[in-house]
Image (tube, rainbow, N blue to C red):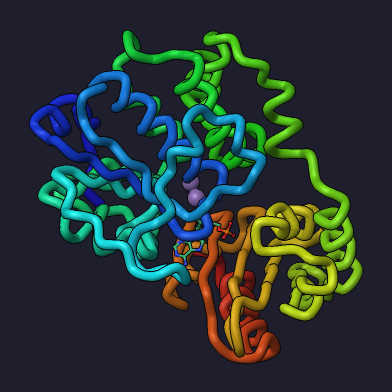
Amino acid sequence: MKSMNKIDLIKECESAGTIGISGHIRPDGDCVGACMGLYLYLKKVFPEKEITVYLEKPADIFNCIKDIDRIEQRYGCTDEGCFFIPPRDVFFAVDCSKDRLGRAESLFDAATKKINIDHHVTNADGTGDVNYVIPDASSASELVCNLIEEEYMDVDIAMALYIGMIHDTGVFQYSNTKPETLQTAAKLIGYGFNFPKLIDETFYEKTYVQNQILGRALLESILFLDGKCVVSVIDKKTMNFYGVGPKDLDGIVNQLRIIKGVECAIFLYETGTLEYKVSMRSCGKVDVSKISAAFGGGGHMRAAGCTLNGTSHDIINNLSEQIEKQLIDGVNA
Ligand code: AMP
Ligand code: MN
Ligand code: MN
């Protein structure tokens, strides 16, 4: 693993006329916050440049972020047809490696200069021409904050990045919260936004149906490996019954993880015929990034994910084999 120096965003973008920014498919709070924080910053430094965020539609809870409505969702091929975007001079992949950009991957590939800002241990080398990947960092939003020249920082940029940080740290609760994380967050709240409201409205608050499906997932969860592991599966039919989509399932796996005695939690939801999105969380004895990476996904030691094909039973069997191995032999075996 190379140690990576900070990159000079202003220098990297100075001669570009067009700049694109994107993050991973099914964008979470960190992905949205980091992309928008970076966008608002670059727009402030270079008001004359054409700067665009290409991202799947973020959840409505993020509507409080300035200029969120300027995100371009029409790129690549969608249900509405195919949209050609001329190659950008600079393109940023934020909070993921290039292969998780979805419809934006070809825009990244076509760009003259590709920059990758990420904090996933499974992308330690980066996938850009220029890389800033710090697996120890709490969030991509913290990394973007590190790269910002303070004279341009303002309340809108600070709020976007703060949202990203609270989402990836569980409001500074998870072990990825470092002293630097809190120092960065302290600096951000100094810009004077209503952070308790933001935490409530973007992190804790759930709609009625979100709570219902959470309850359903908990009710139907199954303990295995002597109570050290828990799994829950939500199929398409159940999602349709409650009228919910993937964005409504956030937080379920975290609730499963905090069951007393559980070392590893798995949550599956059906994304297609014999296809499931898998989320895994660990309390520290299991490195779930290794397991998800072995199945073509990625993530962090305590939070990782992948998409797998097969019946949910087969998927759980395959995952549990790996988890059991780690529980017996240790994380580094
Ligand atoms: P999730 O459970 O989907 O919220 O993901 C937990 C962590 O793993 C997040 O940091 C994700 O960005 C990462 N992750 C999830 N799915 C994948 C994947 N297919 N490839 C790489 N990283 C992933
Ligand atoms: Mn993310
Ligand atoms: Mn992240």
Q: Is residue 234 above or below residue 203?
A: below
- Identity of the residue drawn at 59% across and 63% down: 286
Residue 228 placement, left or right of 137: right
- Identity of the residue drawn at 38% across and 33% down: 143
Residue 228 placement, left or right of 28: right
- Identity of the residue drawn at 60% across and 89% down: 274
Where is residue 302, by image quadrant?
bottom right
Q: Nearer the viewer, residue 305 or 226?
A: 305
Where is residue 167, by image quadrant?
top right
Q: Could you say where residue 1 lies in the image, as x and y percent from the top left?
A: 25, 52
Q: Is residue 91 above or below residue 332?
A: above
Residue 242 placement, left or right of 248: right
Q: Nearer the viewer, residue 56 or 269?
A: 56
- Identity of the residue drawn at 57% across and 56% down: 303
Residue 318 visible within the image: no
Where is residue 262, by image quadrant?
bottom right
Q: Could you say where residue 38 lies in the image, as x and y percent from the top left?
A: 36, 32
- Which residue is the extreme one toward the front? 80
Residue 3 placement, left or right of 222: left
Q: Is residue 49 above or below residue 230?
A: above
Q: Could you say where residue 53 lies in the image, as x and y percent from the top left?
A: 37, 43
Q: Number of marks in the image?
A: 0
Q: Could you say where residue 40 lies in the image, as x and y percent from the top left?
A: 38, 27
Residue 247 visible within the image: yes
Q: Nearer the viewer, residue 269 or 289?
A: 269
